[in-house]
Image (cartoon, helix red, strand yellow):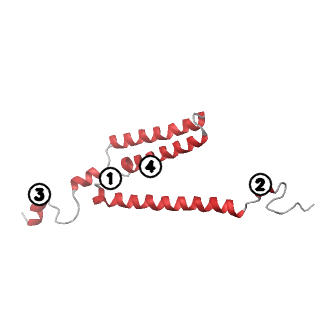
Amino acid sequence: MSDHHTAHAHGHDHGHGIDHHDHMEAHGSFKDYSIGFILAVILTAIPFWLVMTHQLAPGTTKFVIIGFAAVQFVVHMVYFLHMNTKSEGGWNMMAMLLTIILLFIVLTGSIWVMYHMNANMMPNMSNEGNSVHGMHDMQ
């Protein structure tokens, strides 16, 4: 037998970077997909029920929905995208954390800018009475 075949028979990968056992574990089983699906349905149904039945105050409901969305995000990443600290040597998790941080910065900054532009650009909108954007009726 050649060295190449002997190495493969003994489970060595010759630096190809592929371990077939780890590759097979990277894909989820039917059980993993079923658990993920059931969790996703529950994490969608509870906020829907809260909104439809008005169980909580509107402000509280917003924060509860955001919390459920964050948990559902993690469920999708773990059960459907199979992201964990072991996949791809941890680089998938690092890429995901960077994406979350950048997304948080962009969304928070955008909301902050829009709020302040609305407050600072049109300060007299509620005090003008019948006028629209500072312009009087042309009758």
Position of 99 with respect to 10 (left or right) is: right
Residue 68 in the image: x percent, y percent? 48, 43
User: Label 2 is placed on what type of residue?
Assistant: Ser
Label 4 SS = helix
Give the residue at mark 2.
126
Q: Do the residues labelled 2 and 3 touch (CB within 8 Å)?
A: no
Q: Which of 106 and 21 is in front in this view?
A: 106
Label 3 SS = helix
User: Label 3 is placed on what type of residue?
Assistant: Ala
Position of 52 with respect to 36 (left or right) is: right
Which residue, as the protein is rendered here, is positioned at the far left? Answer: 1
- The Cα atoms of the two marked residues, 4 and 1, are separated by 13 Å
Q: Do the residues labelled 4 and 1 touch (CB within 8 Å)?
A: no
Give the residue at mark 3.
9
Q: Nearer the viewer, residue 28 or 43?
A: 43
- The Cα atoms of the two marked residues, 4 and 2, are separated by 39 Å
Name the image quarter holding the C terminus: bottom right
Residue 136 in the image: x percent, y percent? 87, 61
Dot label at residue 73: 4
Give the residue at mark 1.
84
Residue 1: name its quadrant: bottom left
Q: Which of 108 and 95 is in front in this view?
A: 108
Label 2 environment density (alpha carbons within 10 Å; few <14, some 14–19, many ≥20): few
Residue 96: name its quadrant: bottom left
- The Cα atoms of the two marked residues, 2 and 3, are separated by 79 Å
Does label 4 or label 2 sit earlier along the sequence? 4
Q: Which of 92 and 138 is in front in this view?
A: 138
Position of 69 with respect to 114 (left or right) is: left
User: Label 4 is placed on what type of residue?
Assistant: Phe
